[in-house]
């Protein structure tokens, strides 16, 4: 398990990524984020759900050289909506969202 907390604290831009369905089966990015969250806890270097979300989105884009990528006013990034009824926080979102929860907006 990668020491993600230590990597973040060292200033390393990291991201959560996936291989193709041909080599790794079903493509489920939310499951990858859940795995990152649970793995950090098993390593006794827990990340918050918010940190995992940031790694999977903004920091992940930065790790690929897409500096300045963020969801904000004037942004041109593709957006999705997640339909997870009665979800109160980021951890619940990561635990309950599935590929079926995703709807592309732009």
Image (cartoon, grey):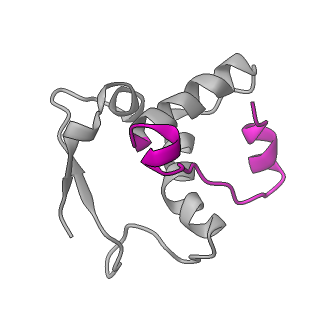
Q: Where is residue 64 in the image (x, y as percent from the top left)?
A: 62, 69
Q: Residue at x 51, y 61 (%)?
A: 58
Q: Which residue lies furthest to the front in this view?
A: 22
Q: Position of residue 88 (x, y in %)?
A: 28, 29
Q: Does the magenta stretch include residue 24?
A: yes
> Can you tell which quarter of the image residue 51 is in?
top right
Q: Is residue 41 left or right of residue 68?
A: right
Q: Is residue 48 left or right of residue 30?
A: right
Q: Which residue is drawn at 61% across and 68% down?
A: 62
> Can you tell which quarter of the image residue 92 is in?
top left
Q: Is residue 98 magenta?
A: no
Q: Which residue is drawn at 33% across and 33% down?
A: 93
Q: Position of residue 36 (x, y in %)?
A: 59, 33
Q: Which of 77/75 is in front?
A: 77
Q: In this view, does 102 lie to the left or right of 34?
A: left
- The magenta segment is 1-29
Say which quadrant the N terminus sits in. Answer: top right
């Amino acid at each position: 398990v990668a020491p993600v907390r230590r990597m973040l604290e060292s200033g390393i831009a990291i991201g959560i990524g996936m291989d193709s369905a041909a080599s790794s089966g079903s493509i489920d990015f939310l499951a990858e984020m859940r795995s990152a969250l649970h793995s950090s806890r098993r390593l006794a270097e827990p990340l918050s759900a918010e940190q995992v979300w940031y790694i999977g989105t903004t920091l992940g884009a930065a790790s690929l050289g897409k500096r300045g990528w963020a969801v904000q006013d004037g942004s041109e990034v593709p957006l999705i909506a997640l339909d997870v009824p009665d979800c109160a926080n980021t951890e619940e979102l990561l635990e309950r969202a599935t590929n079926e929860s995703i709807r592309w907006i732009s």
